[in-house]
Amino acid sequence: MRRSIFFFIFLLIIGCGEKPPVNIYVSKEFNELSKKDIIVGESIWATTCFRCHMYGSMGAASVRNKDHFDQLAEKGFDHLYKSVLNGMEGEEGIMPPKGTCYSCSEDEIKKSVYYIFHLAKKVQEAEILKQAVGEKEF
Ligand code: HEC
């Protein structure tokens, strides 16, 4: 009897709850980015996003900060995309709408959001490798 009550509550939660966000790193879109998507994302990164997210200036998190980016990834693409499109107030700084790429289309902003996670993963993997081989600089 008790079991069936728990099962019922379980079903209720599953049925009524909103779909949990998909971690960006495991999302289909992230894993199927084309070379072209990456180039478009990179060009936006290199003209705007890098100013704050390369070293973590203006209260932004650096792409090297694995813990922070892992936590962001959990929020899922839709949430992150909206934050960049509309801008957001962080705890230590403000990201202006479109991450200051005002001439960017919505599609380009989407690609820049995927790109920043693509880059974060690459940079973090390089850092881990560096630690593993015990070298300070490559
Ligand atoms: C003027 C500085 C600045 C620029 C330029 C900027 N950001 Fe940000 N960004 C921030 C700050 C501050 C935050 C809040 C703290 C954090 O999570 O890094 C933030 C947060 C984020 C987040 C997390 C959003 C959330 O919901 O938690 C993502 C993703 C992001 N930025 C991507 C981008 C992308 C992509 C670009 C380029 C199109 C960009 N940023 C340009 C300052 C900036």
Image (cartoon, rainbow, N blue to C red):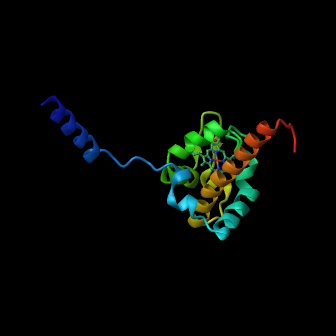
Residue sticking out furthest to the right: 137
Query: Measuring 58% from the left and 49% from the top, which residue is drawn there?
Result: 87
The tally of labels here is: 0
Q: Does residue 55 appear in this view?
A: no
Q: Nearer the viewer, residue 80 or 6?
A: 6
Q: 123 above or below 38?
A: above
The percent coordinates of residue 73 (x first, y second) are 55, 46
Residue sticking out furthest to the top: 2
Q: 22 above or below 71?
A: below
The percent coordinates of residue 95 (x first, y second) are 63, 46
Q: Quadrant of the N terminus?
A: top left
Left or right: 25, with 55 as reference point: left
Q: Nearer the viewer, residue 52 or 121?
A: 121
Left or right: 19, with 40 as reference point: left
Query: Measuring 21% from the left and 38% from the top, which residue is drawn there?
Result: 7
The percent coordinates of residue 52 (x first, y second) are 72, 45
- Place residue 11 in its image quadrant: top left
Query: Measuring 73% from the left and 63% from the top, which residue is drawn there?
Result: 43
Q: Does residue 50 appear in this view?
A: yes
Q: 41 above or below 83?
A: below
Q: Nearer the viewer, residue 126 or 23?
A: 126
Left or right: 17, with 3 as reference point: right
Query: Measuring 50% from the left and 45% from the top, which residue is drawn there?
Result: 75
